[in-house]
Amino acid sequence: MQFFIAMTPPTSTAQMKKIRVVKGKPILYDPPAVKEARNTLNAYLSVNKPVEPFIGAISLRVLWLFPRGKTHQNGEWRITKPDTDNLQKLLKDCMTKCGFWKDDAQVAREIIEKRWADEPCGIYIEIEKLEE
């Protein structure tokens, strides 16, 4: 399964959680930017979700294409934040919620790239069931 989400990829990540103390206990919460990123990803992903969730080991390839500015070339590697692992965490959490698989622990192989790009920008996703 493969698809492209035409959008400006979010730069807010799951690691941006905030902490507040309620009755002496720490409570983690998502700030508004992370909530917005999560809601946007869920909306785009739900349109592409498989009829049945993937079962077993999965290979996930993701290409993040960010809009390039005047100082970058089309296809140039993006070596600035956010880190690929932080981007992937939010994406995989959303894919789990949308029903791509039961648990993102099923992702046994990942290939992640982030690049600067001319339009269209977005997220290219490829999911493949791995042989047992």
Image (cartoon, helix red, strand yellow):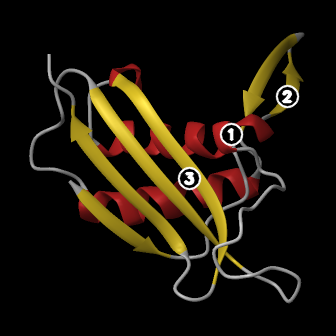
Q: Residue 103's image quarter?
A: top left
Looking at the image, tell me whether mark 1 or mark 3 is earlier in sequence order: 3
Q: Name the residue under label 1.
A: 86
Q: Residue at x 75, y 35 (%)?
A: 15
Q: How far apart are marks 1 and 3 (CA)?
A: 13 Å
Q: How many labels does the image show?
A: 3
Q: Name the residue under label 3.
A: 38
Percent of width and height locating residue 68 = 74, 81
Tell which tag, 2 or 1, sits nearer the viewer.
1
Q: Residue 46's image quarter?
A: bottom left
Dot 3 crowding, Cα within 10 Å, few <14, some 14–19, many 20+: many
Relative to 17, 42 lies left or right = left
* Vertical relation: 118 (above or below) 19: below
Mark 1–mark 3 contact, CB under 8 Å? Answer: no
Local SS, label 3: helix
Q: Distance between the residues labelled 2 and 1?
A: 18 Å
Q: What amino acid type is highlighted by mark number 2?
A: Ile
Looking at the image, tell me whether mark 2 or mark 1 is earlier in sequence order: 2
Looking at the image, tell me whether mark 3 or mark 2 is earlier in sequence order: 2
Q: What amino acid type is highlighted by mark number 1?
A: Asn
Q: Residue at x 32, y 52 (%)?
A: 126
Q: Mark 2 points at which residue?
A: 19
Percent of width and height locating residue 48 = 25, 61
Percent of width and height locating residue 81 = 82, 52
Percent of width and height locating residue 109 = 40, 29
Give the residue furthest to the top. Answer: 24
Local SS, label 1: helix
Give the residue furthest to the left. Answer: 51
Local SS, label 2: strand
Q: Residue 75's image quarter?
A: bottom right
